[in-house]
Each structure stands twice: as C-alpha cells, then as structure tokens.
Amino acid sequence: MGLQNSKKLFLDAIKNNYAIGAFNFVNLETLSAILDAANELKSPVIVQCSTSAIKYAGIKEIYAMVKAKMNDLPVILNLDHGKTFEDCKNAIDNGFTNVMIDASSLPFEENIKLTKQVVDYAHKHGVTVEAELGVLAGVEDEVSASNDDARYTNPNQAKEFVERTGVDSLAIAIGTSHGIYKFSGEAKLRFDILSKIEQLLPSFPFVLHGASSIPADMVSLATKYGAKLKGANGIPEAMLNEAVTKHNVVKVNVDSDLRISFTAGVREVLTLNPEVVDMREYLKNGKKYVTQVVKNKMQNVFNSANKAK
C-alpha cells in the first residue's frame, strides 16, 4: 500500500467518526509493537518521531524500519514537533509523509510565516502539514511549557491561521498537557472551545497533543517493579472518545502511555528474573505491553479498528 499522507485518511476519519492514533516510537521494538496492533485490528495508524528520536535512531534508519515493518496497512510517517523549517525539510526529504511544524511558542504572525514556509515546501512534495495554535503545559521530549504559559486556542485566530497558511490539520489547546504528570486536580477538556472552532472551520481535521491517558494498570505494574511514578495521571479515555466521536478530532498523540508500558515490561522481567541478560527477553516483554495499550486505544478509544482500506 505504501506510506500515505494525511489528506484522504483524515477526511475518512471525519466522515466515519474515528481518529487515527499517532504513536511515538524510538526503536524497532516500539515500532513493531505499534504496527503489530494495527495489523491485528486492521486499523490505520500514524507512527511518529520527535527530532530527539531522530537524533537517537537516525532518520534513514527510521524510514527503513517503517518501510520494512508496515505490511499492507495505511500508515502515515509523521515528524512530531518539528521546531524549524530545516527540521521539517529534513523529514520531507527523507520520506516522511506528514510533518508537524510547532511554532506555537512564537507570536501569531511569526507562527503563520514559518508554518506557511513549511506548507509551501511540503505541498510541492506531496506531504501534508500539521501546525499548532495555543501552547500546552507540561514536558515531553523536546516540548516544554510551564503551567503559567498554558493557554487555550482562540477560535477566531484558528480560522485566520488555517486560511492564511493552507495547513492540512491543526493541533489545538483545549486542556491537554504533555508528560505523565498532567494535572494537579481533575482533568477537563474545553469542548466548548472546540465546538466554537469547529463552527468556524467545519469539516476541518483537528489534533490533540498531550493526550496520553496514563493507564492505571501500567502505572501500577511499573511501580510494583520499582518505578517511581507517584501522581502520574492523564486524560480520561471517555473524554478522548468524546473528542473523537462527537467532534472532528482525527489525530490523537500517544507517547507517555507507551513509555510507561514498555518500562513496566522491562522492569517486570529484570525484577523477577535478575539472572536474565538476554536483551530479547526483557525487550519482548516491553513490546508485549505496548501492543496491549495500543490495541486498547484503537478498539475502545479511537474507534479505528477495521477502518483500514
């Protein structure tokens, strides 16, 4: 089937009330776990890397791994949180089919200027572009913002931004947060803001970043075997499902959930079997739990199972 950009897949997701999970990976094991789940459930999937993951694994190696493991699935290979035009150009030139330019920390006009530059280059190469408007709190990989900096996306600015940049999808800030310690209190997504944006941009694809749910069973398992994750919490899956099935949220980013589940699997083997030095044994267990978490997202949260075409 080959790698695809986001255009047709996102339109189908809007039409049929589902979202495509965007799962971060940094190595062969996490990539294989994600694609195993997608293959089993016949789900379209987005596999994505941050710039720091690219530095760690190598961009040519990442592309080769995805091509080798994707089988006959609709797969988008996405750059997550590119910060510069050069970040995005590098990904486009090396086979990525969607790039995310994150200039959300810049003033509005500068965000528009940089995003438009990326869009112009990407569209010439058949690549779709995601941008972000509004800043999320929290820390994950090379993305950070203090709680004081968190702000919601302005609906009128969102409309102007999309019209002036020609961007293909937009990540919006409605209360999600990066990292595994998302909230000091109860989670709340501003669906009222999302609805206002949708009124101004009907049938347009929206994205949620910082949307890991931090599954309690994986936190408990990792903690049982020595991880220190006190206070870890995330977005309730019921809220994510509402965003997907009742709104035009077609891409939901998941990273922290995979980190925790992989860590839980590795810790379990090394704690119960301290004599094990075969990396395949503990990496295989980490992979198993990642696949479990991804399958749950596809089946019970994103509604994407059996949507592969």
Image: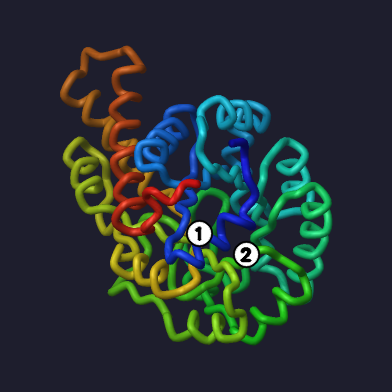
Point out the tag, 2 or 1, that comes first from the N-terminus: 2
Location of residue 237 with respect to 259 vertically, above or below: below
Left/right placement of residue 112 relative to residue 180 reads right
Left/right placement of residue 14 relative to residue 295 reads right
Q: Position of residue 218 (x, y in %)?
A: 24, 45
Q: Quadrant of the N terminus?
A: top right
Q: Position of residue 23 (x, y in %)?
A: 47, 46
How many residues crowd around disc 2 within 10 Å: few (fewer than 14), some, or many (20 or more)?
A: many
Disc marking residue 169:
2
Q: Position of residue 280 (x, y in %)?
A: 35, 17
Callouts 2 and 1 close, C-beta under 8 Å: yes
Location of residue 224 with respect to 99 vertically, above or below: above
Q: Which residue is mark 1?
A: 251
Look at label 2 and name its amino acid: Ser
Residue, x 61% and y 67% (percent of image)? 170
Look at label 1 and name its amino acid: Lys
| SS assignment at label 1 | strand
Q: Position of residue 303 (x, y in %)?
A: 36, 58
* Of 254 and 219, the residue lying toward us: 254
